[in-house]
Each structure stands twice: as C-alpha cells, then as structure tokens.
Amino acid sequence: MLLEIEGYELERLEKPVTRGFARVTTVVRLRGGEEGLGEDVTWYAEHHDREQAAGAVLPLAGPWTLESFSDALEMPDPHRRWAYESAALDLALRQAGKTLAEVVGREPRLVAFVVSPGLGDPPSARTVLRWLELDPTLRFKLDPGSAWSDDLIAELAGTGAVVTADYKGFYTDQDPPPDADLYRRVAEGFPEAYLEDPALTDETELALEPHKERVTWDAPIHSVADVEQLPFPPRTLNSKPSRFGRLGELLRFYDHCEQRGIGLYGGGMFELGPGRGQIQYLASLFHADGPNDVAPGAYNDPEPTPGLPPSPLQPSPEPLGFRWGQAAGTL
C-alpha cells in the first residue's frame, strides 16, 4: 500500500490509572493530506520525556510503501516502532480511501473484554466486588502476587468472574518470583481460568502439569518464531500488537495462529489515546470472542465508576483508516 508523508508531530499524554501510577504515552501524528495516528506505549515515562525533548527529528517525509517505511525505521524498541507503523497504516488507508476491515477482508464483530484492576496493597477483593456491583456481567484478568492468601483466592473465585490469572513470570522486577505453591493454588482455585505467563522451573512446571491446556503466553511473544519456540504447543495466546512492532510480523502471526487452530485474545498497555481503539479494532477483526484485555480506557481509572460501556463493545470503526470511534469509549 502506498504512503505519502509530509511531516509528523508528537503529543505527550499523561493520566493517573489503576495500580497507583501515572501512565505516560506519546501520540504520533503523521501528516500527508490526511493525518495518521499511532501511540507509543513504551512503559517508562523517561522515554517519552526524551522523545518530547528531541522533537520530530526523524527523516520520514517522502513517498513510501508500508513495507519500505517499515524497513527504513531504525527502531529496536517494538513499542515505539508500533506507534509509527500503526500511524503509517492509518495514514495510508486514509489516503487510499479504505478501512482496515476492507483491506484484510474481515467484518468487525462485537468485542468481548475483561477488566484488569490492581487489588491494592495488601490485596483485597474490594475493587472486583465494587465493579461487579456496578455491572454483574463483568469479567476480570488479575495478577496473582505473593500476598495472595487462600481466603482471597476463594473469595475471588466465588465471584465466578475471574477468567485470566497473569503470573507475570517474564518481568524481572515483578512480584512474585516463580512460586510453585502460588502457581498451584491459583490454578486449582480458578479451575477454568487461563494461566498466563508462568515462569517455568522444574517446580512450577510440575505444579502446572495438570493445567497445561490452560497455560497461555504474552510477554515472550514478539514473532511467529517465538510461538514455535515455546516449551509446548499453545492452545491460546495473548496478542499485543505493540510487542510485535512490525505490522507485517503481526499479520504473519495472525495467519500462523489461524492455520494451526491457536486461539487468541488481545491485551492492552494502559493506552491513553488512539492506541486503545486500535487494539479494540484488531480484536474485533481477529479475536472478538476472547477474554480481551482491551476494556474502554475509563475502566483503568483509579476507582470504579458507573455508566461505562458494557462488554461486548459494539463495532465502531471510523469510516476510513485504522481507528475505532469514540463511541466505544476508547479515550
């Protein structure tokens, strides 16, 4: 697909979110008659501060194809790369008068989503119970920690609303370290939930052996090659576009999983701008029925609030490009 870029601008976004921190992201605005939007969801605020201080210094102006644009980007960080590649896709589609759904030959569908709040310190079920008071149909993705007691697991399990437990085993600074007892207690306490990103040791692998069909992966997946190198064939995977960086690699991943019958669900990175709608758009096309961690952005506010769009989200693609309308509550 052809692409013409005249210039670009960067916009810094910042907002307090659940789990007690201020999220910072950067919106990339590519200009070329139309405007293409993407969002850099690199985790650290210092990165975005440096981007703002440097300004729009990349030599992006000129005629491209999406492939040549991707090849020209010298960006090892996939999150930053995805911001520019998604903005280029949005701009190219708008310049061509097309939508993403039209180009990939898929119809947008209702998007099921889950909510992923933090449980506080010390952890409690309060936030989950409060959300369920507001909407009993909500479902949740939670991050078990070393302070999770059997009583807390039982209370959360009693809601019937926990569909994914994320062990966070691939984050070096993340609580907990690999803990076979916690892995076992969580797997047994939530007998139908997906078990995401366990750190496999001899002990944790033994604890999860009876539950391997529910093990899914997120953080290690950046390419088709990563899928093929997993310790055992997955039944389900979490798809985060910003982990892939390259649009072409993301599309190869979708094809690979479809051909092998690997189920998918989508994940978010506390996007504050157009990136949230874009991952909802992709979910609507490629894995609409999964437990997608792509809830409208207001679900990431520090406290539960009433009146938010329920799951599933109505399809809300904009008439052109790679954007999901604000009707879906993306901002």
Image: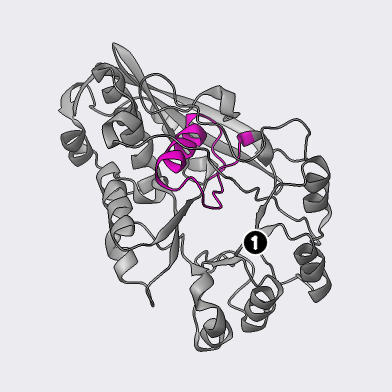
Nearest the camera: 86 or 24? 86
- Viewport quadrant of the C terminus: top right
Residue under circle 1? Answer: 143
Is 60 located above or below residue 129 in the figure? above
Nearest the camera: 71 or 288? 288
- Viewport quadrant of the N terminus: top left
Per the image, is 82 magenta?
Answer: no
Per the image, is 275 magenta?
Answer: yes
Nearest the camera: 139 or 179? 139
Image quadrant of residue 23?
top right
Residue 223 horizontal/vertical position (percent) = 31, 57
Residue 315 horizontal/vertical position (percent) = 50, 31
> In the rendered image, is residue 174 in sight?
yes
Image quadrant of residue 61?
top left
At a point 47% along the width and 37% down the height, the residue shown is 109
At a point 46% along the width and 43% down the height, the residue shown is 283
> In the rendered image, is residue 49 in sight?
no
Nearest the camera: 147 or 193? 193
Label 1 crowd bin: few (<14), some (14–19), many (20+), radius 10 Å: some
Residue 314 horizontal/vertical position (percent) = 55, 31
Residue 105 horizontal/vertical position (percent) = 29, 36
Q: For the residue marked with disc 1, what is the amino acid?
A: Asp
Q: Which residues are magenta?
A: 269-297
Q: Is 126 displayed left or right of 97 in the figure?
A: right
